Image (cartoon, rainbow, N blue to C red):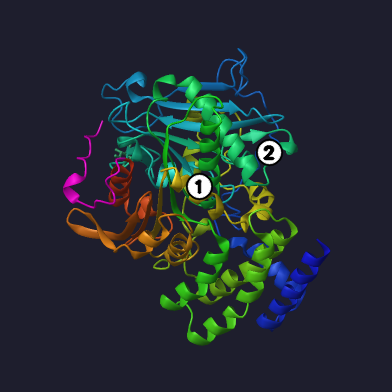
Amino acid sequence: MARDWARVFASVVVIVLAVGSTTGASVLEDMLVAPSDFPSVHAEKLIRELNLFPKELDVVNGRDGVGAGGDGKRITERKFVFPNLVGVDSGVSVEDLGHHAGYYKLKHSHDARVFYFFFESRNHKDDPVVIWLTGGPGCSSELAMFYENGPFSVADNMSLVWNEYGWDKVSNLIYVDQPVGTGFSYTSDKRDIRHNEKGVSDDLYDFLQAFFEEHPKFVKNDFFITGESYAGHYIPAFASRVHQGNKAKEGIHINLKGFAIGNGLTDPAVQYKAYTDYALDMGIINQAQYEKINKIVPACETALKLCGSDGTVSCMASYFICNTIFSSIRALAGNTNYYDIRKKCEGSLCYDFSNMEKFLNQQSVREALGVGSIDFVSCSPTVYQALLVDWMRNLEVGIPALLEDGIQLLVYAGEYDLICNWLGNSRWVHAMEWSGQKKFVDSAEVPFEVDGSEAGVMKSYGALTFLKVHDAGHMVPMDQPKASLEMLIRWTQGKLSSAAEEDAVRLVADI
Ligand SMILES: *[C@@H]1O[C@H](CO)[C@@H](O)[C@H](O)[C@H]1NC(C)=O
């Protein structure tokens, strides 16, 4: 450990020298606010009181209180209809709708409750079960639910309008607020705060077991894990946890078929190194700036080697060191939205997500969901900071074992995202060592066609597919809703790599 520190300290000195004009102290200060990265700390407007220690716990979801499980059950779930849902008055019942909101009292916790939404498929109950995880770390999955691939979006007048391309058109779709402290999830005991992927993936696995116990008719369906951004960490860890549980015949067998990572952070050593290349290619920085910022790379790489997949002090150090690469580019990019370099960064999180907050804080909505007085936390700075030690760890290491067992991996990336850019993602996917590596690398890039035009380009071999999505930033389903629904349909049916347009299944009719 002492030697780690010495090398890390030397790296910090190198950076201070490389960056030049600033003192060590101010470099560190800059970096502490610069995590800036994923929807996070600087999102003051969106961030309300933390849900780690709510003042009132007398709220109700079921009759026994939020996730109380008075009858010994850990899940308390209700069917509901959102108020102001456009077009629902015309004869659709709560039963028909199959929309559920629930709390799960975490098995391995002192007092933690995880909130989730479950939307039964608009098409067929036999459709796959798909779980979505938003990143941050610490951002609520409701961001995706209302702005990317959920059943509906929030209109300015607070009506909910059906999303023609919601992923619930072809899947039974779950959104979880996790880790605890995010969204409507909460705990009253700080020992329940998670600091690593073991904690995160064990909780998700326990949740999934309880979910399938509550919904036995979905156990036989295919199951897929999806998500975005920091979920590039959660997803491989969760997939490995499920696979391991299946192999050990632990609990209910989960029919895990695949996992998809959208604009994720999975292999930091490869992805941090790609920042300057992407920024230069896209004209965000010039050659001189490129060379100057690249001087930080060797120190970042040294720190990352020490961090590996399970380091501690070295991982924290590498977070601060490597993020100077990103924050330097960000400073030069000015007001550019680092989730979509075609746009300006406006408002907190670089996008305006205020309608979601307004909507979820309405009394009628809270009553429908049964969340009582629990605050809704879009992005929790406490959860974010608790995972800093996890940030730079390499999550690619567990993936080859899953591929070898035939579990499908789709890595997709919108081409205009800087923060988790396609270049870094493409590089780690190509560099990953597994039995199909050579064939994957040698395989031809083919168009991903939707409606007769190229919506992206992809490469595929065996269980692995990489897809670069055109005209999209960090949030692909928000920018390219139709293409992303097509991607989900073809991928879950094993037809994505065959690329044939006529294979695409007709979209089902609106409710
Ligand atoms: C609210 O806006 C939506 C979408 O623009 C529209 O369909 C709906 O009719 C509006 N509702 C009211 C009450 O104005």
Mark nearer the viewer, 2 or 1: 1
Residue wearing tag 1: 401
Amino acid residing under circle 2: Leu
Q: What is the distance, in whole Å, between disc 2 and disc 1 at their CAs?
A: 35 Å
**Which of the 4 quarters of the picture holds residue 296?**
bottom right
Amino acid residing under circle 1: Ala
Decide if residue 300 is on the left or right side of residue 426: right
Residue at point 67%, 70% (across, down): 302
Q: Dot 1 surroundings within 10 Å: few (below 14), some, or many (20 or more)?
A: some
The residue carrying mark 2 has its beta carbon less than 8 Å from ligand 1: no
Q: Is residue 496 magenta?
A: yes
- Secondary structure beneath dot 2 equals loop
Number of the label disc, if any, that sits on residue 414: none
Q: Let me know if residue 354 appears in the view.
A: yes
Give the percent coordinates (x, y) of residue 361: 52, 37
Give the percent coordinates (x, y) of residue 39: 54, 55
Residue furthest bottom in the image: 288
Q: Is residue 189 above or below residue 389?
A: above
Report the front residue among 282 and 158. Answer: 282
Report the front residue among 266 and 398. Answer: 398
Name the magenta segment's main secondary structure: loop
What segment is highlighted magenta in the picture? 493-511
Residue wearing tag 2: 52
Q: Is residue 37 magenta?
A: no
Q: Dot 2 surroundings within 10 Å: few (below 14), some, or many (20 or more)?
A: many
Residue at point 51%, 37% (across, down): 243
Report the front residue among 145 and 153. Answer: 145
Mark 2 or mark 1: which comes first in sequence? 2
Dots 2, 1 in contact, CB < 8 A: no
Residue at point 48%, 58% (across, down): 433
Q: Is residue 36 above or below residue 157?
A: below
